[in-house]
Image: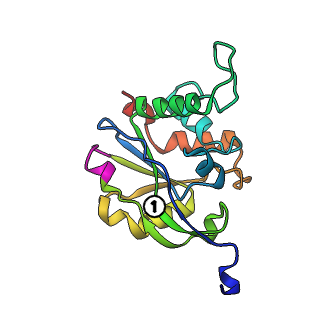
Amino acid sequence: MAASDEGYQHIEHGFEPVFDQRSRVLVLGSFPSVLSRANAFYYGNPQNRFWRVMATCLGMPVPPNEGNLLASGEPATLDASIAAKRAMLLNGGVALWDVVESCDIKGSSDASIRNVVPAHIERITDAASIEVVVCNGGTAGRLYKRYLQDRTGLSAIVLPSTSPANAAWRLERLVERWSGAADWQAFSI
């Protein structure tokens, strides 16, 4: 292995997109983080602000992370957390996936992504009347434009990443920018 290949792994995405025929907004990340891959669901790092931002945009309660207390006082299981997050998105008319189906990557580093195999975006666009594409961060935006924009025929709104690595953007500022990018609640079911 060449020195430049050190630390790289070829990784398959590993879990399904979230969408149904009522989805009108497609939110795309770049590729799942190590924690998301371990949980087999999107934005698995509790420090990622995605779920808080989306809940505010959609005017819904923030879904629990694994271990958070539910209304019953019981801690949420991973399955219950995923179900609540999935329900929030679908009730908000939001589809969620990543631009990359597989790639070579070092850990969770978007900057290290190479040898991209793009997602089969038609799985969503053939099933739902997507009106708006939103990319979570610049890497997702660049990869979308390079690999998927011609296939969807839709330009993307590229928003600041909700990743904890994007420390320059505080939660309040992210919410303001994401909320102003689309009339999210107009797509709610």
Three-letter amino acid code of the residue under disc 1: Glu
The residue positioned 54% from the left and 58% from the top of the image is 31
Neighbour tally class for label 1: few under 14, some 14-19, many 20 plus, Cα within 10 Å: many
Residue 28 vs residue 189: left or right? right
Is residue 51 placed above or below 145 in the rendered structure?
above
Disc 1 target residue: 101
Residue at 71% over, 45% down: 170
| Coloration mode | rainbow
Compared across the picture, whether 110 is left or right of 150 comes to: right
Question: Depth check: 11 or 138 in front?
Answer: 11
- For the point 47% across and 62% down, the residue is 100
Query: SS class of the residue under badge 1?
Result: strand
Q: Name, please, the residue furthest toward the bottom.
A: 2
Specify start and end residues of the magenta stretch as a single range: 123-130
Residue 108 in the image: above or below residue 57? below
Please provide percent x and percent y for residue 124: 33, 49
